[in-house]
């Protein structure tokens, strides 16, 4: 008689669990890569404020949603078959050279082309998802492009104590100053109904990881979306970044992220805050800050062993399984 097959990560996890992940860029892609190991019912709700690089150029020329973060989310959810991996590589291919295509990702061009053909943003993203065999769905957080507006102290290097109003995701993300607060323009953007429905019907909603002020916090500034996040019966999880003190959140500690979350969405409660041990410099203080948001603190290793600032998809999946499984 053959020995029984040992239990696997997938076998111990309900495949139908409905999870909505909110964010953008590489952080959201890392979350989706882990989540698709746990459930086939993943919906990514993606920021639409990018104004740099290929996305910024296409946004300006064609007056469309910036496609780059949407493309990355689709690629992260692609099927592991040869077909899926091939189309993922096609989407992610970026042109070299010195001409007009330099720097454009082929997937960005494809997505904008499909939007023009179909005249429907969500239908176009669903079509690309079917092409990839995506294990889930990708939706924009709003129905129109957004502009990030931030109040930053020390944005101008020669005036370190001055407060500046800085417009645009690219400038905010690359600032050397301290971000005090952010807003969006327009302040009440057109919602994405499918995203609101996904949040309302979810079992779990997950925010982060990702660039804090330009990928995670903007979701809390879309009125219809934050209302849906507040009203949903789903449990809510905040996944803290592995490098809480760098980039837009220079000199932050983990507790500062939770304080910032509360300032931007004072009525939104959490159930779980997930943190890698390396970001927990004051466990008692962090547990207290999480409790102030209604959440329990879950500490689990989710980083690659040899690259501490990079998420390990299997370790992150294991940590999420223990929380949401």
Image (spheres, rainbow, N blue to C red):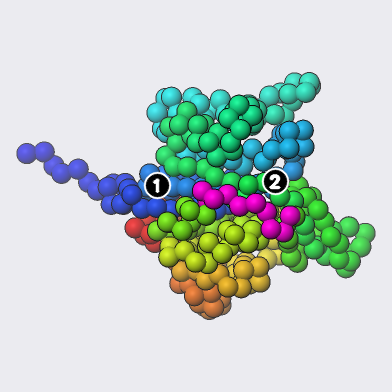
Quarter of the image for the N terminus: give it. Answer: top left
Name which quarter of the figure residue 94 lies in. Answer: top right
User: Which residue is depicted at the point 75% across and 55% down?
Assistant: 185
Q: Main secondary structure of the magenta part?
A: loop
Residue 233, given in percent of the width and then of the height, sits at 43, 65
Secondary element under disc 1, as helix, strand or loop, is loop
Residue 303 point in image, percent of width and height: 51, 52
Residue numbers of the magenta segment: 186-195
Residue located farthest toward the left when viewing the structure as drawn = 1
Q: Nearer the viewer, residue 38 or 267?
A: 267
Q: Residue furthest right?
A: 158
- Helix, strand, or loop for circle 2? loop
* 38 lies above or below 286: above
Q: Nearer the viewer, residue 36 or 157?
A: 36
Q: Residue at x 45, y 31 (%)?
A: 130
Q: CA distance from mark 2 to mark 1?
A: 26 Å
Q: Assign the C terminus to one quadrant of the image.
A: bottom left
| Horizontal and vertical percent position of residue 107 | 60, 29
Left or right of 109, for residue 239? left
The reply to whether the C-beta atoms of the residues labelled 2 and 1 are less than 8 Å apart is: no
Observer-side mark, 2 or 1, equals 2
Which numbered circle lies on residue 145?
2
Residue 41 — which label? 1
Magenta stretch contains residue 191: yes
Question: If you read the primary sequence from the N terminus, does the residue marked by circle 2 or circle 1 appear first?
Answer: 1
Q: Residue at x 54, y 27 (%)?
A: 89
**Is 103 situated above or below 254?**
above
């Amino acid at each position: 008689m053959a020995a029984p097959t040992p239990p696997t990560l997938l076998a111990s996890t309900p495949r139908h669990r409905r999870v909505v992940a909110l964010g953008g860029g590489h952080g959201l892609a890392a979350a989706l890569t882990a989540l698709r190991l746990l459930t086939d019912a993943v919906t990514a709700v993606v920021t639409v404020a990018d104004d740099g690089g290929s996305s910024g150029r296409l946004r300006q020329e064609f007056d469309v949603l910036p496609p780059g973060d949407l493309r990355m989310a689709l690629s992260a959810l692609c099927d592991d078959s040869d077909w899926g991996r091939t189309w993922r590589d096609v989407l992610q291919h970026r042109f070299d050279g010195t001409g007009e295509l330099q720097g454009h990702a082929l997937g960005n061009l494809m997505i904008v082309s499909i939007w023009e053909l179909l005249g429907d943003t969500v239908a176009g993203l669903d079509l690309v998802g079917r092409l990839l065999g995506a294990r889930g769905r990708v939706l924009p957080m709003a129905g129109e492009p957004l502009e990030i507006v931030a109040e930053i102290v020390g944005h101008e290097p020669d005036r370190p104590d001055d407060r500046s109003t800085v417009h645009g995701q690219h400038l905010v993300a690359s600032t050397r100053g301290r971000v005090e607060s952010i807003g969006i323009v327009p302040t009440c953007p057109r919602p994405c109904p499918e995203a609101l429905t996904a949040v309302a019907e979810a079992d779990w909603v997950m925010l982060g990881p990702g660039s804090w002020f330009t990928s995670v916090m903007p979701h809390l500034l879309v009125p219809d979306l934050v209302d849906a996040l507040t009203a949903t019966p789903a449990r809510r999880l905040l996944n803290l970044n592995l490098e809480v003190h760098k980039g837009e959140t220079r000199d932050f500690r983990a507790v500062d992220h939770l304080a910032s979350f509360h300032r931007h969405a004072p009525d939104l409660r959490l159930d779980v805050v997930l943190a890698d041990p390396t970001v927990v410099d004051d466990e008692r203080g962090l547990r207290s800050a999480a409790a102030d948001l209604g959440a329990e603190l879950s500490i689990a290793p989710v980083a690659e062993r040899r690259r501490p600032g990079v998420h390990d998809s299997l370790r992150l999946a294991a940590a999420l399984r223990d929380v949401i499984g």
